[in-house]
Image (cartoon, rainbow, N blue to C red):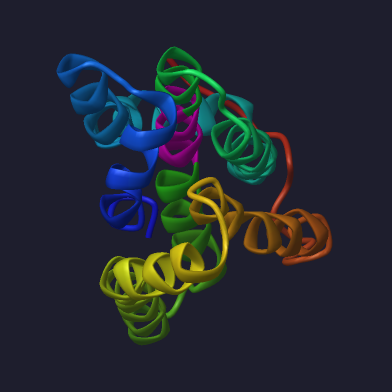
Amino acid sequence: MDLTVLNLAVPHITADLRPTGTQLLWIVDIYGFLLAGMLVTMGALGDRIGRRRLLMIGAAAFGLASILAAISTTAGMLIASRALLGVAAATLAPSTLSLIRTMFEDEGQRTFAIGIWMASFSVGGAIGPLIGGMLLEYFWWGSVFLIAIPVMALLLGSAPSCCPSIAIRPASVST
């Protein structure tokens, strides 16, 4: 949802922070750029330090970066916050997918779980502008970043107890 929710806030951000054209491009694009660019690296890091551990670190970082983005007072601060959001988001996707693979050994269940994961991703992208528009109707532009906080809090609260058979640390890493 963070890929699409920002689009409606751009006029509000422009009026408030007065970014240059280049800064505005970075505000919009740096999240997706770093998310895509860091996926493989974060997947490998998850293999090294543990997928659930990386998921929890990424969720905490995503929550903190969302708060920083919401309270940004300059275009540079918002760009840096969006960059942190992109890196943190890159930890979430490979961690969740690898955990699905570990949790669902049956191929049919795993296929269904990945289908739900992908549908959730797609629905998030589709409803981002709707939720963003509603938030912008009643709140300031920073509120579009705060919608991730309850989701990250839920993830951080449930991840330690979810699937206790999945170790936080990897069993071994062969090179």
Q: Is residue 109 above or below residue 64?
A: below
Q: Position of residue 19 (x, y in %)?
A: 30, 20
Q: 48 or 137: nearer the eye? A: 137
Q: Quadrant of the C terminus?
A: top left
Q: Position of residue 169 (x, y in %)?
A: 71, 34
Q: Quadrant of residue 101?
A: bottom left
Residue 56 forms part of the magenta stretch: no
Point out the stretch of residues depicted in magenta: 82-91
Q: Position of residue 15 (x, y in %)?
A: 35, 36
Q: Main secondary structure of the magenta part?
A: helix
Q: Quadrant of the N terminus?
A: bottom left
Q: Quadrant of residue 110?
A: bottom left
- Residue at 31% across, 34% down: 14
Q: 89 or 173: nearer the eye? A: 89
| Left or right placement of residue 154 versus residue 115 in this view | right
Q: 132 or 91: nearer the eye? A: 132
| Left or right placement of residue 50 versus residue 38 in this view | right
- Residue at 43% across, 72% down: 131
